Each structure stands twice: as structure tokens, then as C-alpha cells.
Image (cartoon, coloured by chain):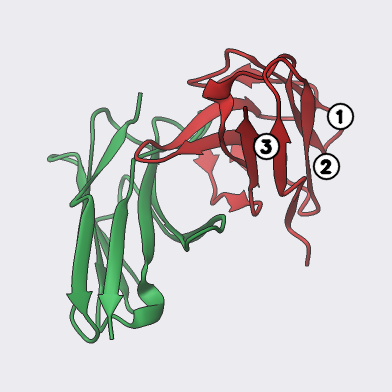
Amino acid sequence: NAGVTQTPKFQVLKTGQSMTLQCAQDMNHNSMYWYRQDPGMGLRLIYYSASEGTTDKGEVPNGYNVSRLNKREFSLRLESAAPSQTSVYFCASNDQGAGTNEKLFFGSGTQLSVL
Amino acid sequence: SQQGEEDPQALSIQEGENATMNCSYKTSINNLQWYRQNSGRGLVHLILIRSNEREKHSGRLRVTLDTSKKSSSLLITASRAADTASYFCATDVSGNTPLVFGKGTRLSVIA
């Protein structure tokens, strides 16, 4: 029972470098999400994909891009990393739509530091 | 911006005591969910309560929802040291919109 798998777990970047965070789920969920968590700020939604082939901006999308590669995989890309993007990133998935928003399953997180 | 706001921000109790955390939100909701996060880990779902429900139980957890006051409470009875974690409420305005999380309550249960 893998659930939601995120890679890498830790990453250190220099300002201006790019990287992609990978996320995969094996629960056949139609919706996937990327959140960031900063101290004292709780979780804030970056982007989400309600279903395969669709993506939408969340509360804090600037500086990020996403790709819903297939139903299982949803990646988050930082094109030019900035120190303000130092954070812990969580991928999550659930079944959403048709009037229901079921519980989220979270990955274990990626701790990213941008120097 | 965050929809839900937990209160208190931090709570410290003795093992065996009950812990109560509150969540207030701003707009009408479809459902409200509570999650737990142990230090350095991802969030884990605890309980979901729909807008037409007033109370739900799951083991030592009791959740209430008052839509007229736009608030919810999470009660953990007979707390244990293993309950030490951060607790978050999350709401959605419809089943087709993403969950929005509050900033959380940090609970410390002292053995």
C-alpha cells in the first residue's frame, strides 16, 4: 500500500536553478494537489488537478508550473528557484467532484531549501 | 487566504485530560475535515463532517459542527502522549472546489 509517493524527500537548490518534484498515487484518485507548508502559515494550495488533463491555480501559484502526466502522476516544477520558495511541499490526492470532496491522502513531503 | 482558523494556536495538557480545539470559517461550506500532522510527516485524515451533520464520533474523537456560528470543534478524550501533533481543519465551499486548510493547533500531551 504505497498511497502517495513523493520524490525527492530533501533538496537544496541555488537561486535560479530549476527542479521538478514528482508525485504518484496508486489509489486511482481523479484529483491531485500540491500544497506548500511554511511555519505558522498552515498549508497553502499551489496548483491542483481535478481530473486527468486539467490543472488549475490555487492560492499561491506564482513561480510554479504543473503537469498532470496521467491519472497517477502530478509533477510540480520550479523554473527559477527563489529563496521565498524554501518550504515543505506536500502532494495529495482524493476523489472529488459530483458534489463530494472526499478525504485527502498526503505524501510524506519534500523539504526544499533555496540558497 | 485561509478559510478556517484554529483556536488555540497551541495547547498543552496532561495525559488523560481532554483536549478541545476549535475551527472557525468564513463562508458556507460543503464539508469540514480534521487532519493530524506528526512532526516531520504528512497530514493524516481524522474525520469528515458534512454541512448537514451536527456531530460525529470516531474512537476517542468527537467533532461538532455549528453552521449558524460557522464553527467546529474537535474533542480528543483521555489524551495520550502519542496524540502530540498539530491538528488542522479544512473546508470546501462545494464538492468541486479544493480543500482549504487553517493554520493549525499544536497539541502537546505531557506524560
Judging by colour alone, the chain drawn in red in this rendered image is A
Which residue does the image show at 62% across and 27% down from the upper left?
A115
Q: Position of residue A20 (x, y in %)?
A: 79, 29
Which residue does the image show at 33% across and 35% down from the upper left?
B29
Q: Earlier in the sequence, mark 2 or mark 3?
A: 3
Chain bearing tag 3 is A
Chain bearing tag 2 is A
Q: Residue furthest left?
A: B69
Circles 1 and 2 in contact, beta carbons < 8 Å: yes
Q: Quadrant of residue B48?
A: bottom left
Give the amino acid type for the residue marked by disc 2 in the picture: Arg
Placement of the C terminus of chain B among the 4 image quadrants: bottom left
Q: Is residue A69 left or right of residue B25?
A: right
Q: Are marks 3 and 1 on the same chain?
A: yes
Disc 2: which residue = A72
Real-space CA distance between mark 3 and mark 1, rounded to the nearest whole angstrom: 13 Å
Give the amino acid type for the residue marked by disc 1 in the picture: Leu
Give the amino acid type for the residue marked by disc 3 in the picture: Ser
Judging by colour alone, the chain drawn in green in this rendered image is B
Q: Are marks 2 and 3 on the same chain?
A: yes
Q: Which mark is residue A31?
A: 3
SS type, badge 1? loop
Q: Which mark is residue A32?
A: none
Badge 1 local density, few (<14 within 10 Å), some, or many (20+)? few
Asked if one can make out residue A94 in the rendered structure from this viewpoint, the answer is no
Disc 1: which residue = A69
Which residue does the image show at 58% across and 12% down from the upper left?
A62
SS type, badge 3? strand
Q: Earlier in the sequence, mark 3 or mark 1?
A: 3
Real-space CA distance between mark 2 and mark 3, rounded to the nearest whole angstrom: 9 Å
Q: Residue furthest right?
A: A70
